[in-house]
Image: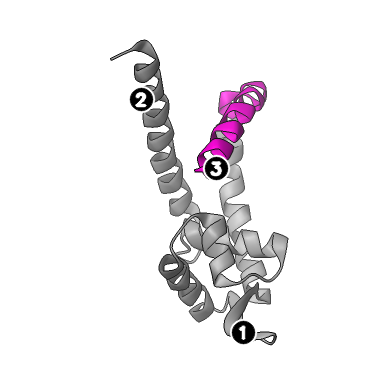
Amino acid sequence: MSDSSALAISLFSELLTADQLVRARLTKVLPNRMEISHFSVLNHLARGGERTPAQLARSFHVTRGAMTNTLGKLEVAGYVHIRPDWDDARRKLVSISTAGKAAREAALAAITPVVTEMVSDLGEDRIRGALPVLRELRLRLEED
């Protein structure tokens, strides 16, 4: 194995392991048995207004079925409103509810100390230095 191959494997191994560990840590502190996928959708809707389930699925790089499942759970919890698109009856539009905004705020309050501690432990300057590389990696992966 070449040095560049070993480096690439090490990078992706670290990214995948870090992803698993951060998800586990955040899941422990999210309120009301909320899942990270639920928080992510609520956070997206809070910043961007109404979206179709298909748009959300594309944004999160998941199947429409996976997004439908997540939206169903959020709707049962009262965190989102799903309504017909008045211009195209075949489509639906999803928006965050007042309860969803409150749940998002509670989740943010719960996860902020965890992520702030991680950033503090690693050092803000090191995080700022790593972000451009991680962002470029994400953008390249999104192109595929």
Q: Residue 84 location in percent, x, y?
A: 62, 86
- Sequence-first tag of 1 and 2: 2
Point out which mark residue 83 bears.
1
Residue 109 horizontal/vertical position (percent): 63, 54
Which is in the foreground here, disc 3 or disc 2? 3
Magenta region, residue range:
120-144
Judge left or right: residue 30 versus residue 7: right
Q: Is residue 69 above or below residue 115?
A: below
User: How much space separates mark 3 and mark 2, taking CA atoms?
Assistant: 20 Å
Label 3 secondary element: helix
Three-letter code for the amino acid on which mark 2 is drawn: Ile
Residue type of the residue flagged with mark 3: Glu
Q: Is residue 37 at all visible to an observer of this figure?
A: yes
The mark nearer the N terminus, 3 or 2, is 2
Q: Which residue is mark 3?
A: 143
The CA span between labels 1 and 2 is: 45 Å
Residue 76 magenta-drawn? no
Question: What residue is shown at x 40% (from left), y 47% (from top)?
Answer: 24
Q: Principal SS element in the magenta part?
A: helix
Q: Report which residue position mark 2 lands on.
A: 9
Looking at the picture, which amino acid does disc 1 mark?
Answer: Arg
| Mark 1, other Cα within 10 Å: few <14 / some 14–19 / many ≥20 | few
Which image quarter holds the N terminus? top left
Q: Position of residue 96 (x, y in %)?
A: 65, 72
